[in-house]
Amino acid sequence: MMIRLIFIIFFSAITHFVLSQDTRTIKFKPNRVKLFLDIPDGYVFVRLEGDHGEKINKYIYNDSSIVYVTTFQNTPNYSNIRKQGTYYKKFMVQDSGDTLLLRGVDSLGKYWKNKSFGGLSIGYKNISFKDKVAYDEVINSFRRRRRKRKR
């Protein structure tokens, strides 16, 4: 029990350090609504738009990890979701407006996560075990309002 507590405190401290040191608040605007996410700096930004108004913002890091926000039905985790057998759950959520969290480990031992809110998905892929807690905090930072700056 004590080892578990030390482990949790250690990863919480690392996560706080990583996310408080070099993060940036990014903005995503699907359908006139501003959404915000705090992500680590050091990424290459890629944005794609579809013919029917779909959008995806990808933040790609040197170690091949990716954070994304998208309104496309098929996310960067499409193959992981299909292999898990949960694609139809995700497909049903897009029409219902419910929230669905899918996650797992790919064939290379890298972690992935996809959180869907109706027609919007946020997630990550290619995350190592040591960075998983920090990237979970990235997903948890998703919000509709910008945080107030500390003075």
Image (cartoon, helix red, strand yellow):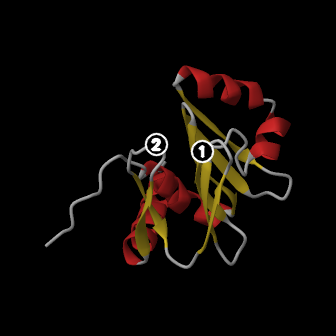
Residue 41 pos. (x, y %): 50, 76
Q: Nearer the viewer, residue 135 or 81?
A: 81
Q: Is residue 9 above or below residue 42?
A: above
Tell me the kind of residue under disc 2: Asn
At horizontal 60% and vertical 51% (from top left) the residue drawn is 55
Q: Nearer the viewer, residue 8 or 81?
A: 81
Residue 67 pos. (x, y %): 60, 60
Residue 54 pos. (x, y %): 62, 45
Mark 2, residue position = 31
At horizontal 60% and vertical 23% (from top left) the residue drawn is 95
Residue 45 pos. (x, y %): 59, 71
* Of the image marks 1 and 2, the number of the one nearer the N terminus: 2
Which structural element holds mark 1?
Answer: loop
Mark 1, residue position = 53
Q: Is residue 147 left or right of residue 25?
A: left
Q: Nearer the viewer, residue 107 or 98?
A: 98
> Quick check: marks 1 and 2 in contact, CB under 8 Å?
yes
Q: Nearer the viewer, residue 102 or 12?
A: 102
Question: Alpha-carbon distance for marks 1 and 2?
Answer: 9 Å
Tell me the kind of residue under disc 1: Gly
Which structural element holds mark 2?
Answer: loop
- Classify residue 66 by image quadrant: bottom right
